[in-house]
Amino acid sequence: MLVVSVATLSAACGSDSDGPDSGAADRVTSTTRLLEAAPAPDPVTPDGVAVAALKEIYTWQPAAEPQGSSLARARKWLGPSLIRVLDTSAAATETPRQSLRWSDWAKAKATVQAFTFASGERPPAGADPNTEQYKIGIEQTVVYPDGRKEELPPSTVIATVVRTAEGWRLDAFR
């Protein structure tokens, strides 16, 4: 569904100009910004679970929570391996590497908002129908109370989702 939405948006944003130098640079829009307008993946599908879980994990609230607590906020989306990580003292070593700027953001009462999306590129099908992997793009924006925004460098993770009795759950990401 996400791939169809992106293809539709890409076609809709095509140029109707006659030449390559007719102001195309003024109309350039990143693929990610086009994806923001597309419907989010269904959070009961494997890719939708990966997108929802990683959005929660990469959204940070430095003024209100300690580093590493975003994994606990994503608990409802997590599979057995990440639940074990969360419930052990080693959880901090398995969470995303937050910035050295965490204390600066906390003092400024800024939040870090994540936008996550599944790539249309799929790895080869595995032997286990209860395990799937997805490439998930992550873009983070620091939002300050005065409305100022700062884009952080984008990243990509490989998310592994597993089928559980509760449905699909994020079980690992790297």
Image (spheres, rainbow, N blue to C red):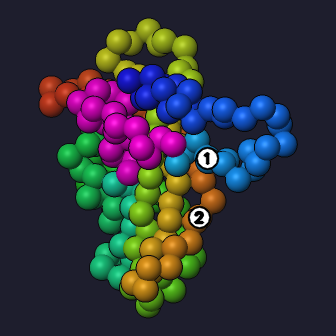
Decide: marks 1, 2 in contact (CB < 8 A)?
Answer: no
Can residue 145 be seen in this snapshot? yes
Between the C-alphas of marks 1 and 2, the distance is: 15 Å
Circle 2 sits in a helix, a strand or a loop, which is it? Answer: loop
Can residue 92 be seen in this snapshot? no
Q: Residue 134 location in percent, x, y?
A: 48, 29
Residue receiving disc 2: 152
Is residue 112 placed above or below 78 in the rendered structure? Answer: below
Amino acid type indicated by mark 1: Ser
Amino acid type indicated by mark 2: Leu
Name the main secondary structure of what is drawn in magenta: helix
Q: Is residue 162 magenta?
A: no
Q: Which mark is residue 145?
A: none
Which numbered mark, 1 or 2, is in the foreground of this view?
A: 1
Q: Residue 111 location in percent, x, y?
A: 40, 74
**Which range is magenta?**
34-55
Left or right of 19, for residue 82 = left
